[in-house]
Amino acid sequence: MYARAKATLSARARDTLELDAAIREDFGESGSRYGSPRIHRVLRGKGRKASRKRVARRMQVLGLRARRPKRFRKTTEANAKHVPAPNLLDRRFLWEQPNQAWVGDITYVWTFRGWAYLALLVDLCIRRIVGWSVSEHCDTALALQALQNAVARHRPGPGLLHHTDRGATYMAGAYRRRLHALGMVASMSRKGECWDNAVADSTIGTVKIEALGDTIPADIHEVRAILFPYIEGFYNRRRLHSTLGYMSPADK
């Protein structure tokens, strides 16, 4: 019956039905995370011709909306006992090669058993989350674990620029000594200048809204269970990044 009904439609109407089906499929495969620009890119990659405006209109008609980022409070506080590193990054967010500059930040995740904390490091060339860690404590050990994970996997050479905010976690002596031992150059945002670490902040916002949304995990173990497939399977391997010309970090 559907086939007969479809046969009576105009070519434009049939094309719209097929486009809607393709949009629904790609939106579902993204985990309801993609808006019209990324859906348009996915369709183009599959050889499907449709303008960006038409894709946006069809998504609106279909009621398909990407998860939107929310504002989150900072978890790091400055420690007056330590002198911050200078802002050597100076908002240079585009780098030619991997392992030249990493940016890091820490955020919180509410669970039914209290707070959990996520630390991550992002490569500014390929926008890959190179290292991350989750803990029940927002401390230097959390940040060091994310750093260790990044170093173990990517083995950067001496001279890598490591940029964060002025949080006590990153200004701690143990963390600064570890950076020095690894041959990394510390850089920190200026006081009150949130845009100095915009890429790390943006990445954290994306991870929280796309991976967690309004979900409240049961505990820290569920936080890890949610974040691992999202970061390692989707964000680093398949997610299309506008800064990369709608390529994934794995394809960069």
Image (tube, grey):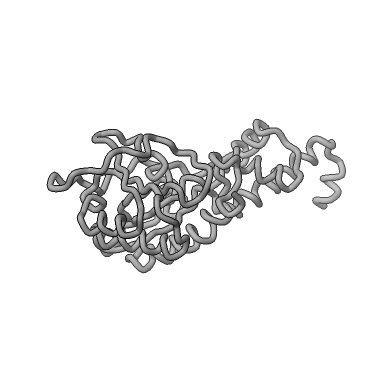
Q: Residue drawn at (62%, 41%), measured in percent from left and top?
A: 62
Can residue 214 be seen in the rendering of this structure?
no
Which percent across, then down, holds residue 200?
Answer: 39, 45
Query: Would residue 177 be found to the left or right of residue 205 on screen?
Result: left
Marker count (numbered)? 0
Which percent across, then down, holds residue 194?
Answer: 32, 36
- Which image quarter: residue 233? bottom right
- Which image quarter: residue 189? top left
Query: Would residue 116 be found to the left or right of residue 129 on screen?
Result: left
Which residue of the protein is positioned furthest toward the left in this rendering? 81
**In the rendered image of this protein, does residue 251 appear above or below residue 218?**
above
Between 122 and 133, the one lying in front of the other is: 122
Which percent across, then down, holds residue 181?
Answer: 31, 59
Which residue of the protein is positioned furthest toward the bottom in this rendering? 221
**In the rendered image of this protein, does residue 196 appear above or below residue 32?**
above
Q: Residue drawn at (30%, 53%), measured in percent from left and top?
A: 108
Which percent across, then down, holds residue 120?
Answer: 38, 54
Can residue 252 be seen in the rendering of this structure?
yes
**In the rendered image of this protein, does residue 106 appear above or below residue 58?**
below
